[in-house]
Image: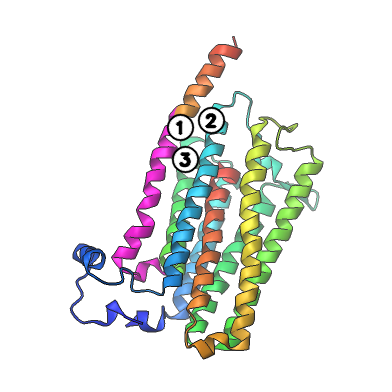
């Protein structure tokens, strides 16, 4: 593997950008899989921003009052309505899964197979929990009569925005759980030990952190706004 | 160099960021819990959101330790989305006013 960062007189800063792009060599001194994952995530950023911008547009333009998410997503616990509590718990679960994933990547590069596998499986379990809670939330809203084309709570666009945005995000989490399980199995079997590199774990980690990143925006812009 | 064996940083940095993300999430939840309204609510939501997003990208996704060329390639293109958002704000407001004028007389 040619490694740019190894050579002694590589310019950094803006001059480094120019030399990295203009010289007759590999532009990014990282594994190609990592660059590809970043570019995929870049395209996914555009998709999710289009969804959130569409949601912003319909919410701005409707003349019917928007349902108050704080009340819609409240749960009755011990005879008391706690606003947005389910969403808050889902947020903490996803953040925790990002934390365990970051540590899995770290232990991967330390070649600690057992800890890497364990932490990845914990991450996947957190992800699966998140999806289950989302399924619960969807069921609750559907039983209350929320549909993509209308709902009894207020603006009709609430349903379509909600199902499209959280649905796409939930699909990403589900895909991530499967992806992480597959990579965790390979870590356990020692595939990356033989290959001599744990970069695949870091690349899977990038995807997982991105899913968490998207949730940060959905939580702020859809649930809290 | 770190790139040769991939990203290696002490575990403590991840635990710190994890804790910070918990604190920031709690604070953004409290914005709703205490029913803050208006510009205070919106600016706090945006600030906490951007701080969390920055920490995730910089530390968890290791962007802080990548070369500037890769940072530019990934972080600059999304800026053109700001144009889309700006246009859609103007358009949404326009449709809202049009609906008021046409349907709610």
Q: Is residue A84 visible?
A: yes
Q: Secondary structure at mark 3?
A: helix
Judging by the rendered image, the residue that carries numbered circle 1 is B89
- The numbered mark 1 sits on a residue in which chain? B
Q: Residue at x 31, y 71 (%)?
A: A26
Q: Name the image quarter holding the C terminus of chain A.
A: top right
Residue A224: quadrant of the picture: top right
Residue A118 appears in the figure: no
Q: Relative to B97, say whether A119 is above or below.
A: below
- Residue A20 drawn at (x, y percent): 25, 67
- What segment is highlighted magenta in the picture? B62-90
Which quarter of the image is occupied by the N terminus of chain A? bottom left
Looking at the image, which residue is at 75% across and 43% down? Answer: A141
| In this rendering, the label closer to the viewer, 3 or 2 | 2
* Residue bearing mark 3: B40
Residue B45 lies in the magenta stretch: no
């Amino acid at each position: 593997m040619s490694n740019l960062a190894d050579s002694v007189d590589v310019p950094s800063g803006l001059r480094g950008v120019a030399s990295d792009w203009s010289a007759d060599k590999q532009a990014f001194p990282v594994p190609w899989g990592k660059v590809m994952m970043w570019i995929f995530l870049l395209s996914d950023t555009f998709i999710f921003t289009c969804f959130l911008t569409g949601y912003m547009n319909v919410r701005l333009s409707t003349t019917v009052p928007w349902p108050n998410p704080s009340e819609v997503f409240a749960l009755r616990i011990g005879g008391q309505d706690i606003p947005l509590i389910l969403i808050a718990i889902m947020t903490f679960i996803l953040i925790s899964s990002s934390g365990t994933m970051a540590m899995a990547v770290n232990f991967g590069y330390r070649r600690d197979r057992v800890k890497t596998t364990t932490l990845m499986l914990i991450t996947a379990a957190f992800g699966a929990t998140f999806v289950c809670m989302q399924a619960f939330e969807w069921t609750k809203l559907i039983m209350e009569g929320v549909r993509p084309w209308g709902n009894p709570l207020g603006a009709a666009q609430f349903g379509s925005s909600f199902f499209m945005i959280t649905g796409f995000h939930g699909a990403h989490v589900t895909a991530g759980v499967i992806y992480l399980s597959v990579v965790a199995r390979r870590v356990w079997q020692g595939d990356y030990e033989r290959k001599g590199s744990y970069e695949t774990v870091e690349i899977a980690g990038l995807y997982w952190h991105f899913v968490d990143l998207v949730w940060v925006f959905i939580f702020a812009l859809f649930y809290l706004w | 160099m770190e790139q040769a064996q991939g990203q290696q940083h002490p575990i403590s940095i991840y635990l710190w960021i994890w804790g910070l993300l918990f604190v920031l999430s709690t604070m953004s939840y409290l914005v709703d819990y205490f029913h803050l309204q208006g510009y205070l609510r919106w600016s706090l939501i945006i600030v906490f959101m951007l701080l969390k997003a920055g920490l995730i990208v910089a530390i968890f996704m290791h962007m802080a330790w990548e070369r500037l060329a890769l940072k530019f390639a990934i972080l600059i293109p999304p800026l053109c989305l700001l144009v889309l958002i700006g246009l859609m704000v103007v358009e949404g407001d326009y449709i809202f006013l049009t609906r008021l004028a046409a349907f709610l007389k």
